[in-house]
C-alpha cells in the first residue's frame, strides 16, 4: 500500500513540517508589546508554554524578555526536527565529488561530506550505513577518529537518537 505524502506534520505541534525563520519569530514576539504574548512560541511548536505565555503575559514580562535572546535557539531546535524534503542521497553524490582527491575518496572524507551535506540536522549511524555503503565497523572507527580530532560532534536529537554533525 503506497504511503500518502500530502503534508508532513511534526509530532505534537500540528504545523506542517516547514522550516521556521528567526525574523518571523521576532515579528511574532513583537506582539507582546501590544499585550499578546506567546505567538512566537506557537510558531516554533512550543504549544504548552505558548498557552502559558498567553495567559500570563509571558510570565509577567520576564519570559518575554528572556525569549528575546532565546528565539534563535528555539527556531534552530524546531528546524532540526523538520524532515528533509529531498530524497536520501540526492545531492550526496555531488558532495562526494567535491571532496575527491585524485579519484580516491577515503571513508573519512565520505563521512565528512555526509556531515556537511546534512548540516545542522546531522546524521545517524543508520543514515551513514545507507548513504555511504560502508561496513559499520569502518564507519564507527572513522567516527571515533573524527571525534578525537574535533571534526565531528556527537549529540542527541529530541527523540534521543545519537546524531553526528560538523561542529
Image (cartoon, rainbow, N blue to C red):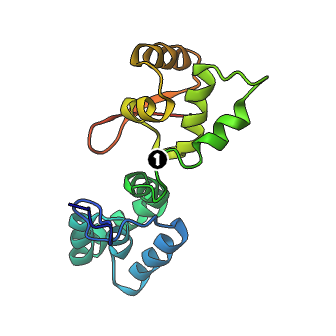
Provide residue 116's location: percent of width, then percent of height: 59, 39
In the rendered image, residue 62, in percent from the top left (x then y), is placed at 35, 64
Q: Nearer the viewer, residue 133 or 136?
A: 133
Above or below 86: residue 163: above
Indicate the quadrant containing the C terminus: top left, top right, bottom left or bottom right: top right
Res. 83 image quadrant: bottom left
Q: Quadrant of the N terminus?
A: bottom left
Horizontal and vertical percent position of residue 42: 32, 71
Most foreground residue, 156 or 108:
108
Q: Which residue shows up at 44% across the image and 77% down it?
A: 28
Within 10 Å of disc 1 (Cα), the crowding (few <14, some 14-19, many 20+) is few
In this view, the residue in front, 147 or 95, is 95
- Which residue is denoted by mark 1 in the rendering? 88
Asked if residue 84 lies left or right of residue 14, the reply is right
* View extreme (right): residue: 102
Query: Residue 12: which quarter of the image?
Result: bottom left
Residue occupying the point 33% across, 77% down: 37
Residue sitting at the far front: 1
- Image quadrant where residue 14 sits: bottom left
**Closest to the observer: 9 or 50?**
9
**Left or right of 77: which side holds 143?**
right
Return the x and y of residue 56 as percentages of the image width and height: 23, 74
Q: State whether residue 23 is above or below residue 88.
A: below
Q: Residue at x 72, y 37 (%)?
A: 98
Amino acid at each position: 500500500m503506497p504511503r500518502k505524502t500530502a503534508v508532513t506534520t511534526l509530532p505534537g505541534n500540528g504545523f506542517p513540517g516547514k522550516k521556521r525563520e528567526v525574523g518571523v519569530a521576532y515579528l511574532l514576539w513583537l506582539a507582546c508589546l501590544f499585550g499578546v504574548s506567546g505567538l512566537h512560541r506557537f510558531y516554533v511548536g512550543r504549544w504548552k508554554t505558548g498557552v502559558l505565555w498567553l495567559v500570563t503575559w509571558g510570565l509577567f514580562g520576564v519570559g518575554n524578555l528572556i525569549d528575546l535572546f532565546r528565539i534563535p535557539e528555539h527556531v534552530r531546535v524546531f528546524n532540526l526536527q523538520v524532515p528533509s524534503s529531498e530524497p536520501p542521497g540526492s545531492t550526496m553524490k555531488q558532495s562526494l565529488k567535491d571532496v575527491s582527491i585524485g579519484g580516491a575518496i577515503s571513508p573519512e572524507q565520505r563521512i565528512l561530506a555526509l556531515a556537511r551535506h546534512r548540516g545542522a540536522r546531522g546524521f545517524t549511524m543508520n543514515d551513514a550505513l545507507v548513504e555511504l555503503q560502508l561496513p559499520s565497523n569502518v564507519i564507527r572507527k572513522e567516527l571515533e577518529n573524527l571525534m578525537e580530532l574535533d571534526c565531528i560532534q556527537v549529540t542527541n536529537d529530541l527523540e534521543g537518537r545519537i546524531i553526528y554533525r560538523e561542529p
